[in-house]
Image: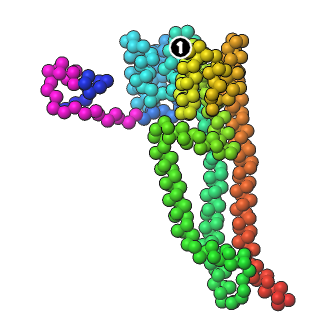
Amino acid sequence: MTGTLEAASHEQAGSLLEEMKLKVNSLTQAKPAKVRTPIGRNEFILFNQQLASLTKAGLPLEKGLRELAADISSRSMRRLLNDIATELEKGIPIEQVFEKRKKHFPPLYGRILKAGVETGRLSEMLISMNRHLEMAGQTRRIVIEAISYPVVVLCLAVVILTGIFTLVIPNFREIYSDWGIHLPALTRFFLTLTSIHITHFWVTVAVLVVGTVLMWKVLSGFPAGRVFEERLIIRIPILGRVYHNSILSRLADATALLIGAGCDVGQALSLGADASGSDRLKRECKILTEQIEKGANLMEAGQFSGVIPRMFFYSMQLGAQRNELQDNLYSLSEMYAQQARGSQAKLSAALMPALIITLGIIIALAILAMFLPMVSMLVTLS
């Protein structure tokens, strides 16, 4: 007979099977099934808002989950919510219930629900969670838009230039070879470019791009590689500022949410870095947490930070002294989000016109090069 068994290690699995009076012929680790998120970000925000409304009306969390499950069309999501409600009704701690299903829900969700239930502020915490998700989605869109617009312009330039060098300029080569005239240097330059097979050139470029993407994916597979990628991105002019400000905005917003949930500063920073999606922030905040636990204040703990600016820590320390830490963090989050939007606007304002002007200059030079011999002949004849 064959089967699967949940255990922390091979030794524990073997011991459990022996207790069942089974002789073990072979024991290997099973591959975990791929877990798919049953709903997208926008659908989850809607679900979370509905759950906040139900809990605000006084329904227990388990009852609210069952009510929502009854109205959801997705079978997998309905089953997931009913299973969670069943386990909660059995008395299983809420953090354990959601830890088992952490791939289905955003980071921090189980902790936020636990804090809301314990403090009696579940509806308020769910609304704060929605705000955090919307802020995180907004900062991600800023980064994506900063990259996507120039890429679209570049692709358009590739198509136009390919058409010119493939369909237009070669016809002039035949015309001028029949005429047997001396060509200007600019014309000879563009005709020489057409002798290079444009298809082979773009295939080479495509291979390099695909290779770069594959290498990027390989680096994304382990923490050190992701840190290396972040260092590269942050060093890119303007785009680096967009990315840097966006992760700081997510860190501040997640930390504020966790402070409201009752976490201490060190724990909130560590978990907030996990929610930010930045491995560099995770490393730095882990060190920060260790320093704070040893008794250092925020300014002392953050003096060696390379990603988080000193103003971030100063604002946090000032907020903690005035009992306004959560408000200061929300202000920081909004400030960095605005800076990210401003940098993204600068990138669009500077890069896109530069790409379009460059494309226009290349096309203008190509047209001038092709018609320059004709102009010279007309001037000579006149």
Question: Residue 343 appears at what percent x and percent y?
Answer: 71, 40
Question: Residue 70 appears at what percent x and percent y?
Answer: 44, 23
Residue labelled with disc 1: 115
Which span is picked out in magenta? Answer: 13-35
| Residue ID at (48%, 22%) | 68
Residue 17 inside the magenta-drawn segment: yes
Tell me: residue 256, above or below residue 136: above
Work out whether residue 374 or residue 125 is closer to the camera in this orientation and state it.
374
| Residue ID at (50%, 55%) | 210
The amino acid type of the residue labelled 1 equals Ala
Question: Residue 80 appears at what percent x and percent y?
Answer: 41, 25
Tell me if residue 146 can be seen.
no
| Residue ID at (48%, 20%) | 110
Tell me if residue 298 can be seen.
yes
Label 1: element kind: helix
User: Crowding near pointer 1: few (<14 within 10 Å), some, many (20+)?
Assistant: many
| Residue ID at (76%, 79%) | 372
